[in-house]
Amino acid sequence: MPIDLNFTLDVITWEAVSALSGLMIAGVGFVISRNLRRHDRHTQRYALLGEYRREVTAFSKEYFEIVADVLAVRDSVEDPAQVRAELERLATRLSGMVDAGRFLFPNDTSGDNAFGFEKGDAFAGRRRPALDAILAAYHAVKAMKTEGDYRQEKLAEALAQLRKTGEPLSEPIRANDPVYLLIQSRRCYLNAVVPETQPDEWRRMFSDILAPVLRATK
């Protein structure tokens, strides 16, 4: 039954007071509920971001360890056959990381990159720069263990994948040096991953926690 809210300035009925109180309580409840929902969304977002960062950090650590192992094997193992076998094993791990990385860095299928769906959803679109960098490392390692035309093919492919990342390369560019290309793959990976996976709120937090970096002067 509808409540009569009509009252005069000198007479306020209990029904009117009760109705107004109910409206005020409902309004306050709505604001509180809205704020709680907003807080829950922020909490869930940060929880997901935190979990994602942990996964990316673990994935990146594995990649950096493989690169370090490649450099160590190349510099320390004397038996050429053993070197080639170990480099092949590490190249295989890098190839596997490119596929496993699709769980963390799925292809971009938005806008102009909406193509290739006939290959399946996992392979449609444009590969992420982070995975281009790892693929460049794979080709660089393959070049280390071969000679002749195949080596040149792998060197060219490594450089092409580095350029696809869109990240800067250290000058001068040594296109025929697989070690240079391998190190550049690590550099491009960092440039592609760190800014993309670090929210602005986290950057501000680090700015508050860490002291400013001052350029050394002579």
Image: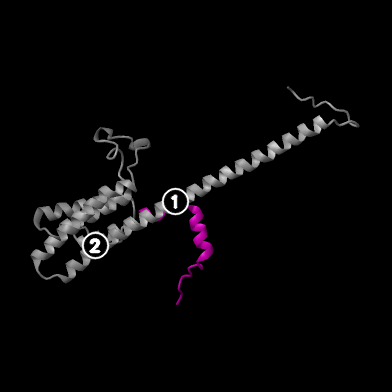
- Report the residue at 56% width, 47% height from top: 39
Disc 2 residue crowd, few under 14, some 14–19, many 20+, Cα 10 Å: some
Q: Amino acid at mark 1?
A: Leu
Residue 196 visible in rendering: no
Task: Looking at the image, tell me whether mark 1 or mark 2 is earlier in sequence order.
Answer: 1
Mark 2 lies on a secondary structure that is: helix
Q: Nearer the viewer, mark 1 or mark 2?
A: 1
* Residue depicted at x 65% and y 41%: 31
Measured as percent of width and height from the top left, residue 18 is found at 78, 33
Closer-to-camera residue (42/126)? 42
**Which contiguous range is marked in magenta?**
191-218
Q: Which residue is mark 1?
A: 49
Q: Is residue 173 above or below residue 112?
A: below
Q: In the rendered image, is residue 67 in sight?
A: yes
Task: Name which residue type carries label 2.
Answer: Tyr
Q: Position of residue 190 (x, y in %)?
A: 35, 57
Disc number placed over residue 180 in the picture, else none: 2
